[in-house]
């Protein structure tokens, strides 16, 4: 792997990106350590600086960009993944904390070309507009239905409560989760 630099947020600076790096402030040469994560059923080894968030590891090092960067501090739900089956904000976890645990991202939900029933239900209910929040909502819904196969509307609202949607698809998202539970 070629040497890499990261800024204070752990975002990789591409080579030749010096102008952007200068705008962001000084970068620091850091040692990269190997880390093996169980992602979507595969063992994936990456090389990241200590303290890299799970979200940065997934997006920057594994190319799994379905989990989105929104707030960066656990407050919007855009980055949710499944961690041992429970919905979790990947932006608040250090990648090392996920070693030895099962990580599932939105890319790992379907089987080949077949969508997961929750993904299908979101499409059928047209429960997305820009789609930025959609992956996170779907991961929360998958976790909910795994623990509560027949959720009440209140259960669904509670599960989706951490997820901010600037497009306002909340009503359709609730209907989608209800549809997926049938
Ligand atoms: S980006 Fe992780 S919760 Fe907002
Ligand atoms: S669909 Fe745009 S933020 Fe939710």
Image (cartoon, helix red, strand yellow):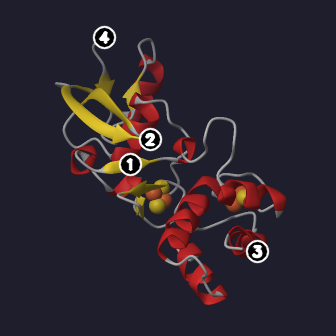
Between 88 and 55, the residue placed more toward the observer is 88
| Pointer 3 residue | 175
Q: Which residue is mark 4?
A: 2
User: Residues under labels 1 and 2: Cα distance?
Assistant: 6 Å
Q: Measure the alpha-carbon separation of dots 3 and 1.
A: 27 Å
**Picture quarter containing residue 44?**
top left
Q: Are marks 3 and 1 in contact (CB under 8 Å)?
A: no
Q: Identify the mark at residue 40; answer none if there is no mark.
A: 2
Query: In the visual, does 75 lie left or right of 48?
Result: right
**Secondary element at image label 2:** loop
Residue 7 placement (x, y as % from top left):
33, 34
Give the label on residue 103, or none: 1
> Which badge, 4 or 3, is on the more N-terminal residue?
4
Could you tell which of marks 3 and 1 lies nearer the N-terminus? 1
Visible residue check, residue 22:
no
Residue at horizontal 68 percent and vertical 71 percent from the top: 177
Of circles 4 and 3, the one toward us is 3
N-term mark: 2 or 4: 4
* Vertical relation: 118 (above or below) 132: below
Q: CA distance from mark 4 to mark 3?
A: 47 Å
Quarter of the rendering occupied by the C terminus: bottom right
Label pair 2/4, CB-CB below 8 angstroms = no
User: Is 114 or 136 nearer to us in this picture?
Assistant: 114
The CA distance from mark 2 to mark 4 is 26 Å
Q: Which one is earlier in the sequence, the residue at label 2 or at label 3?
A: 2
């Amino acid at each position: 792997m070629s040497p890499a630099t990261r800024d204070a947020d752990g975002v990789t600076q591409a080579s030749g990106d010096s102008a952007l790096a200068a705008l962001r402030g000084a970068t620091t040469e850091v040692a990269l350590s190997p880390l093996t994560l169980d992602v979507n059923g595969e063992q994936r080894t990456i090389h990241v600086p200590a303290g890299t968030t799970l979200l940065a590891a997934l997006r920057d090092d594994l190319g799994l960009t379905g989990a989105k960067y929104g707030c960066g501090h656990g407050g919007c739900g855009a980055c949710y993944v499944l961690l041992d089956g429970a919905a979790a904000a990947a932006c608040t976890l250090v990648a090392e904390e996920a070693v030895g645990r099962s990580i599932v991202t939105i890319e790992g939900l379907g089987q080949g070309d077949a969508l997961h029933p929750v993904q299908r239900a979101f499409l059928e209910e047209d429960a997305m507009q820009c789609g930025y929040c959609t992956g996170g909502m779907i991961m929360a819904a998958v976790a909910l239905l795994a623990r509560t196969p027949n959720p009440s509307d209140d259960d669904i609202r509670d599960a989706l409560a951490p997820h901010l949607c600037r497009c306002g698809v909340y009503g359709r998202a609730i209907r989608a989760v209800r549809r997926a539970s049938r």
